[in-house]
Amino acid sequence: MLGNFEVEQCSFSKLRQFHERVLSFSDRFVKIHCKHCVSESISALIVIGLILSFLLAMICTYFHVFPIYQPAVRTYTVHESDDLVAKCNVFYGKWIPDESYPLYNASQCPFAERGFDCVVNGRRDRGYQKWRWQPKNCEIPRFNVQEILGKLHGKRIVFVGDSLSRTQWESMICLLMQGVQDKRNVYEINGNKITKRIRFLGVYFSSYNLRIDFYRSVFLVQPGSAPRHAPKRVKSTVKLDKLDDMSKEWIDSDFLIFNSGHWWTPTKLFDMGRYFQAGRSLKLGMGIASAFRTALETWVSWVESSVNRNRTRVFFRTFESSHWIGRNRNSCKVTRRPWLKTKGRDQSRISDIIIDVVKKMTTPVTVLHVTPMGAFRSDAHVGTWSDKQSVADCSHWCLPGVPDTWNEILLSMMLSKDGVTVQ
């Protein structure tokens, strides 16, 4: 208000000076013309013209100093439900209670691994199953299994990654089985039981000609044996410049979903005598973050050169928040309710590298940035309710649970009208 007042005072002062100059000029003008015997009527017309000019100048000055008020106009775009997820960042929001969850019963799904079925393994509280993810600025379309199965008819979905990828794979199968009347029409193509030791598992929905596969590839690049003449501490290597030798089996697919991260730790690497290798060269001094970026660049080269972008849509899920506590992050305490704050678990160096590398790709890849949403869910881990109850687990998730939300978002993106790019 004070600034506006000073502007007004300054503007009116200038107007007064302008007014005095105009009157003085008109007075001199009239006297000059009187001296030259110009009639009073002509002088009057001149004075009137000058006064009109003065008024016009005042009006122009007023609108310059006080422009006409124009209210701010906000525009909103209304999206169709199947296109909504592609139009907002669904990975930022909050968890809200919802009694309509869970979407399935793990004990009735033959593809839910026993180790992830926390209820069967003795967990009594089921509140962790009754939370729904609510994005900040939009809605995730409600899960409609019949509609989804219809749109996935004749498709092949491939998951590639570690045990967290297998959990998501199991979750998707259990979700989609809710729309199949005769469960016998859903089966593992080789008759294998679900186990973490098998590198390939494939489930076929015969009624829909739909296949959902999982390939175990914890590093995405090739593991290798120790080179000759390597130091004794080197027991095996990770070949950063060579993609997993099973990669040729991933190509013929409609949707490819990758993840990696939980094996890129000192415990899974150096403590086990596993070091990095590029070509014939051992990289004994290479850090984990640098090695992970190098491995992702190898993956990028494969995607750019091998994936048919006219058919296959590629997704990469970021690091899934764990909730280990203690000085060495080796203690696991599962809570009864989600955390109210993320406590820094929404940040991950692995996730940052994934996002940075994917942004530079020419092939469209969608990043499923699940790190922030999982950071709240200290209540949803397996804990001691696994098939090995003597070993607590604050990395993996109970089923049903958080991976179902990943799949709700993933399926919405897969079936959206527009392609989805990195956010």
Image (cartoon, helix red, strand yellow):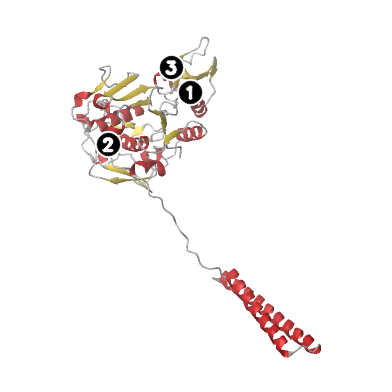
Q: Which label sits on residue 302? A: 1
Q: Quick check: 225 above or below 323?
A: above
Query: Looking at the image, which residue sits at the far right?
Result: 36
How many numbered marks have been drawn onto this rendered protein structure?
3
- The mark nearer the N terminus, 3 or 2, is 2
Determine the image quadrant of residue 18.
bottom right
List x then y, in percent, for residue 71: 47, 63
Residue nearest the observer in this picture, 413 or 207: 207
Distance from disc 3 to disc 2, alpha carbons, whole Å, reads 36 Å
Can you see residue 57?
yes
Q: Which residue position is annotated with label 3?
A: 245
List x then y, in percent, for residue 400: 26, 34
In-image side of 211 versus 318 (left or right): left
Q: Residue at x 54, y 23 (%)?
A: 285
The amino acid at mark 2 is Glu
List x then y, in percent, for residue 363: 48, 30
- The mark nearer the N terminus, 1 or 2, is 2
Residue nearest the observer in this picture, 69 or 217: 69
Query: Looking at the image, which residue sits at the far top?
Result: 228
